[in-house]
Amino acid sequence: MEITELVPEMLGKIDLSPQPRPIVGRFYPSLSRGKWGYEEEWFPAPAGEAVSPPLSQDSLEQYAQGGDLALFLAKEGDACLGYIALEKDFMGWAYVEILEVAAAHRGKSVGTALIQKAVRWAKKLGAAGLRLEAQDSNLMACRFYLKQGFQIGGVNTLRYHTLPAPKNQEAAVFFYLLF
């Protein structure tokens, strides 16, 4: 596996379609005396699937230009195993817009390699760390981020309120990896 940065010549030649992920449980963060904790609920059977929205063509073109934006691909030959899209924001963080790993390659260190590449990129730009948002319904992603050294930094229970049910019942969980 190699990690490469998206460049304009790659646009339209790589499949970056979001992959469905099973909803296997729920992540319940809680704040007590200034310290974040959490509980997990595992469902007896998957409760459906979720799919991230795709990146627009305009977004991909902006990522391919580089600078304070980057999109890194995990590839084996011509196959894209996953990708991570990043932006250095105005507060000095490197924001992870999306981390996507092809369903057939989950659990095979692709996500870890992409996070490691994101850390190197963010440090090179002088960022304070990585930040990202996950849904409390995406238990596997929440567990993955904690395993990578991220910490919970906040929760927004109204972030998805305007979306149709059942998405409007989810909470946004904000994770931070400090450098």
Image (spheres, rainbow, N blue to C red):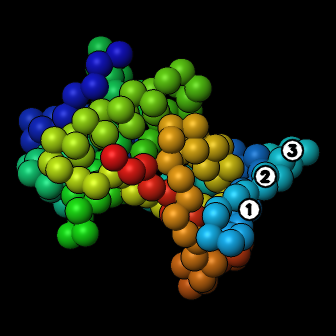
Res. 45 visible in picture: yes
- Asked whether 123 or 62 is in front, the reply is 123
2 or 3: tag closer to the N-terminus:
2
Residue under pointer 1: 28
**Residue 55, percent across and down?**
33, 55
Considering the numbered disc 2 on the image, is that residue within a helix, a strand or a loop?
Answer: strand
Label 2 or label 3, whichever lies nearer to me, is: 2
- Asked whether 118 or 65 is in front, the reply is 118
**Residue 171, percent across and down?**
63, 71
Q: Would you say the residues marked 1 and 2 are in contact, meaning their CB atoms lie under 8 Å apart?
A: yes
Residue under pointer 3: 45
1 or 2: tag closer to the N-terminus:
1
Q: Residues within 10 Å of mark 3 (few under 14, many from 20)?
A: few
Is 39 located above or below residue 124 in the figure? below
The N terminus lies in quadrant? top left
User: For the residue marked with disc 3, what is the amino acid?
Assistant: Ala
1 or 3: tag closer to the N-terminus:
1
Q: Would you say the residues marked 2 and 3 are in contact, meaning their CB atoms lie under 8 Å apart?
A: no
Q: Residues within 10 Å of mark 1 (few under 14, many from 20)?
A: some
Residue under pointer 2: 40
> Residue at horizontal 54%, vertical 44%?
145
- Asked whether 145 or 20 is in front, the reply is 145
User: For the residue marked with disc 1, what is the amino acid?
Assistant: Tyr
User: For the residue marked with disc 2, what is the amino acid?
Assistant: Glu
